[in-house]
Amino acid sequence: MAKQNSTQKTETQSPVQQMAGTEVSFFIPNTEELGTLDTLEDKFSLTMKYKTAEDWAMLKDQEIRCFYMGTKEIPNDKEELVTCGVFVTKTECFIAGGKTLVDAVRQLPTKSPISIIYRGKKTNKSVEGSTMIFDVKTLG
């Protein structure tokens, strides 16, 4: 009976096949901890949400304190990539694509604490449409 060379075996097998037979250990919460799940309150949403103009309108003149976490390019309705800021508050993660907001924060280091206040829209003079206005300050 011929033995298969282990390097040949690795090259032809998928990563899952390579892991077959490998022992995996993990810990699950005890029954008391599992029982508390129904009574726990939501603390932080890990779901990244895009803040739309309507979302900002509901927050007009309210301060949002958050950490700026960098930028991310996401496609818009027309499949064009738009640079958005990524932000984390005490309760959520969100992405915002307002040009004036992104321009204000894009040069900041990652994890910069900032304050954002949406002030409303201003009609553009040179092009059709409006621009969202934000007051952005670093915190320290």
Image: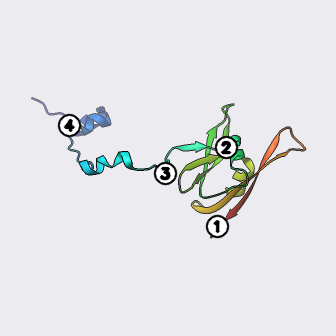
Q: Residues within 10 Å of mark 3 (few under 14, many from 20)?
A: few
Q: Are marks 2 and 4 in contact (CB under 8 Å)?
A: no
Calculate the distance from the C-alpha at mark 1 to the C-alpha at mark 3: 22 Å
Calculate the distance from the C-alpha at mark 4 to the C-alpha at mark 3: 50 Å
Q: Which residue is mark 1?
A: 139
**Which quadrant of the figure has residue 74?**
top right
Q: State the SS at label 2.
A: helix
Q: Are marks 4 and 3 in contact (CB under 8 Å)?
A: no
Calculate the distance from the C-alpha at mark 3 to the C-alpha at mark 2: 18 Å
| Residue mark closest to the camera, 1 vs 2 | 2
Q: Residue furthest left?
A: 1
Q: Nearer the viewer, residue 2 or 57?
A: 57
Q: Position of residue 103 (x, y in %)?
A: 72, 53
Calculate the distance from the C-alpha at mark 1 to the C-alpha at mark 4: 60 Å
Q: Earlier in the sequence, mark 1 or mark 3?
A: 3
| Residue mark closest to the camera, 1 vs 4 | 1
Q: Which residue is mark 3?
A: 44
Q: Which residue is mark 4?
A: 5
Q: Earlier in the sequence, mark 1 or mark 4?
A: 4
Q: What amino acid is at disc 3?
A: Phe
Q: Position of residue 76 (x, y in %)?
A: 66, 35
Q: Which residue is mark 2?
A: 55
Q: Residues within 10 Å of mark 1 (few under 14, many from 20)?
A: few
Whether residue 39 is visible, yes or no, is: yes
Q: Earlier in the sequence, mark 1 or mark 2?
A: 2
Q: Residues within 10 Å of mark 2 (few under 14, many from 20)?
A: few
Q: Quadrant of the C terminus?
A: bottom right
| Residue mark closest to the camera, 2 vs 4 | 2
Q: Earlier in the sequence, mark 2 or mark 4?
A: 4
Q: Residues within 10 Å of mark 4 (few under 14, many from 20)?
A: few
